[in-house]
Image: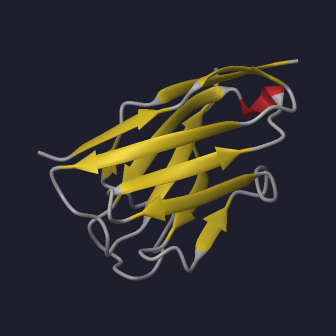
Amino acid sequence: QVQLVESGGGLVQAGESLRLSCKASGRIFSSYPMGWFRQGPGKEREFVAAINWNGGSADYADSVRGRFTISRDNAKNTVYLQMNSLKPEDTAVYYCAAKDHSPFGLGLRSDYNYWGQGTQVTVSS
């Protein structure tokens, strides 16, 4: 059974940083993309960032580019999201996602088939 478990969320003030982690178990995703999504209050879930199998390629939403960095450690089957210069509008539940297709590339932003339970990030002004 595949599990994606996020950690690292919390309450911070605007301008501060957080690092989210997502550990996968039940399957090795080292050949496939992994990503982060978020869902803010009253909003639909949206793409945040994705990383290819070896970290050589990444994709970011315009709203976070330059502030967030996605990385991965395949030996630990873990993906990270470093979030700097946080803003109140970054407040959301952050979800880790993985897919078992589109090897060695990024694929589409919309076709992830494994999801974590989410971790809350709250940024106060």
- Identify the coloring: secondary structure
Number of numbered callouts drawn: 0
Q: Position of residue 83 (x, y in %)?
A: 70, 43
**Residue shown at 45%/77% (left/top)?**
54
Q: Position of residue 122 (x, y in %)?
A: 68, 21
User: With 87 as the anchor, is 22 left or right in this view?
Assistant: left
Question: Which image quarter is the C terminus in?
Answer: top right
User: Is 63 located above or below residue 59 in the figure?
Assistant: above
The residue at the far front in this view is: 75
Q: Position of residue 87 (x, y in %)?
A: 83, 32
User: With 58 as the anchor, is 88 left or right in this view?
Assistant: right
Q: Position of residue 23 (x, y in %)?
A: 35, 46
**Residue shown at 18%/47% (left/top)?**
2
Q: Nearer the viewer, residue 110 or 93?
A: 93
The residue at the far left in this view is: 1
**Residue shown at 48%/42% (left/top)?**
21
Q: Nearer the viewer, residue 113 or 28?
A: 28
User: With 15 as the anchor, is 116 left or right in this view?
Assistant: left
